[in-house]
Image (cartoon, rainbow, N blue to C red):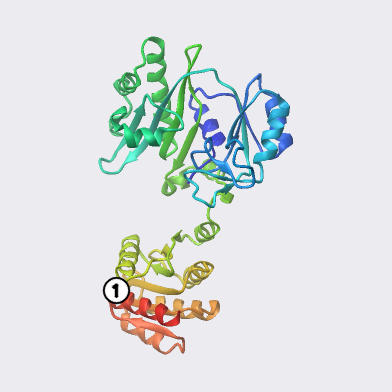
Amino acid sequence: MNIHEYQAKELLAKFGVAVPAGHAALSVDEAVAAAGKLPGPLYVVKAQIHAGGRGKGKFKELPAEAKGGVRLTKSLDEVKAAATEMLGNTLVTIQTGEHGKQVNRLYVTDGADIDKEYYLSMLVDRATGRIAMVVSTEGGMDIEAVAHDTPEKIQTIVIDPAEGFQPHHGRAAAFALKLTGDLNKQCVKLVEQLYNAFVATDMSMLEVNPLVETKDGQLLVLDAKVSFDSNALFRHKDIVELRDVTEEDPAEVEASKYDLAYIKLDGDIGCMVNGAGLAMATMDIIKLNGMFPANFLDVGGGATTEKVTAAFKIILADPAVKGILVNIFGGIMRCDIIAEGIVTAAKEVNIQVPLVVRLEGTNVEKGKEILANSGLAIVPADDLGDAARKIVAEVKQAA
């Protein structure tokens, strides 16, 4: 789960992290009022969307020469003008894709007198089972170019969670950022605070870009992006309340209501599978047979009739779907129960596209019998290869 920048900064501040003063705003009037609470004379108005590259982004509704989603303003009138342009308009960045994201929230912060920008992030390194801290002296909007063109300027420091944060980790980060004297001490303290926040809230990724050195010699978290491990959110009800569903795909939001793992893709064959590994294999074999999956959808081990019906509705809500492949392995779940769910769901949803079903596992023969006697145009398949070939053939024939 992702949260907005202003929410990330409020969370980090609870762990002692130094962040600029700022306030969220949902309207132009609230943005002006937020600026009025700050000392000024420089105010930064930031579009709040779940994507990076806002500073270089472009608004679809504004002229090409218009400024991006991060504006420096020097008066309340300029704050009002910036908020008026941003709110309700669609911001396109390098991370949003061509469709962009509508800006529904703003963050108005106090300006900072920047002397130097740095990059610092933490993430779970699944290859080593440790927390990787990535740092660079080249922070700012062009960090992607740094990673591509001069990767030697990016250094990684690994923290074993069994050992926890140690002062030498902070010193290593400060050394990599070439910080000396009091800035070195500030960096050691800051890194420990960020690590504590990362572990305590079950983050999967924390990105500070930029981490800035101000002209008066202070380290300040100027921007922050945070993602949480969704599997751990049951321990953090306060964090769950920060979720902004308007930033997520509506189909994925609907799927989450039924505990379905759904991700929309760009293909034309809908997939309904139980088990992430089987889902990946199903998508691969569809592509191997010359077509592309329209989604990743894992109904899990307890695929009830309600779940299967919801899954069908979500898949068919995508107008790009030209056919559906159901690939279920009945281990804990019996194939006859799965088959009954498929039949009930297919009748309720009134599927108008080709449907191929492959069942395997407990009570598979009874499950196949239920499908055969359903009176529905369900094409049975013997194995995964057979299922992929049949759904591709059915879609091409129906085209």
Q: Which residue has dot 1 on it?
A: 384
**Residue 153 placement, left or right of 189:** left
Picture coordinates of residue 306 (x, y %)?
Answer: 50, 70
Q: Nearer the viewer, residue 290 or 316?
A: 290
Where is residue 20, by image quadrant? top right
SS category of the residue bearing label 1: helix
Q: Nearer the viewer, residue 388 or 89?
A: 89
Compared with residue 128, is residue 305 higher up or lower down, i.e. above or below?
below
Quadrant location, the C terminus: bottom left
Q: What is the crowding at mark 1: few (fewer than 14 residues within 10 Å), some, or many (at least 20)?
A: many
Picture coordinates of residue 398 (x, y %)?
Answer: 45, 81
Residue type at tag 1: Leu
**Residue 89 placement, left or right of 263:** right
The residue depicted at 34 percent of the width and 40 percent of the height is 124
> Which residue is situated farthest in the top direction here?
181
Compared with residue 274, is residue 20 higher up or lower down, i.e. above or below?
above
The residue depicted at 34 percent of the width and 79 percent of the height is 390
Where is residue 7, by image quadrant? top right
Picture coordinates of residue 246 (x, y %)?
Answer: 59, 50
Picture coordinates of residue 261 (x, y %)?
Answer: 43, 59
Tally the numbered discs. Answer: 1
The residue depicted at 35 percent of the width and 28 percent of the height is 135
